Amino acid sequence: MKNDYNILGKNYHIEKVNNIYDELSGLDFTKKVSDEVTRLDEDLLQLVFNDKLIIDVGWYPPFDENGEFIIQMILNSDWENPSVTISSGWDKNEPIEKLNKVLGQLPFILKAE
């Protein structure tokens, strides 16, 4: 099973992952939000783990230039009550920093140098 993943240009060693869906890394952060808005929906990144843990990143409201990234940690499929919710703006460094903060809470994920 693959354990090394590149997300937003950063390498991660991730264990216990069942599935990864990543459209987030394909966004062009050198462009304005308005140029990428047709790609900004609720389903941009999802890491699904064996132990019923999901890390989810989406743009809310979807397809809206005034939206923002929402990073959530979902436990036991309880989408109504995420255990972590963090928002981020368009600057690429900000979602990377916020995602690192969420992933850093998990003992089986290490950011590669």
Image (tube, rainbow, N blue to C red):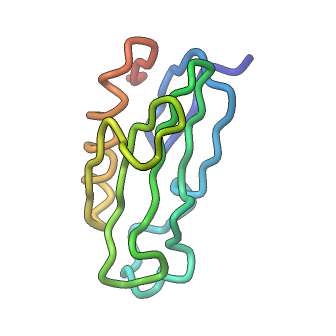
Given residues 22 and 5, the one toward you in this image is 22
* Picture residue at 47% right of the left edge, 76% below the top: 62
Q: Residue furthest right?
A: 1
Residue 90, relative to residue 44: is it above or below? below
> Residue 39's x, y, as percent?
56, 75
The image quadrant where one finds the N terminus is top right
Q: Quadrant of residue 112?
A: top left
> Residue 69's x, y, as percent?
35, 61
Query: In screen coordinates, is 97 left or right of 113?
Result: left
* Picture residue at 56% right of the left edge, 44% below the top: 46
> Residue 16's x, y, as percent?
60, 16
Residue 39, relative to residue 54: is it above or below? below
Given residues 8 and 102, the one toward you in this image is 102
Residue 96, relative to residue 15: is it above or below? below
Residue 54, relative to residue 85: is it above or below? above
Query: In screen coordinates, is 21 left or right of 62?
Result: right
> How many badges with numbers are in the image?
0
Query: In screen coordinates, is 13 left or right of 84?
Result: right
> Residue 8's x, y, as percent?
46, 48
Q: Residue furthest top?
A: 107
* Picture residue at 30% right of the left edge, 23% below the top: 105
The image quadrant where one finds the C terminus is top left
* Picture residue at 39% right of the left edge, 24% below the top: 111
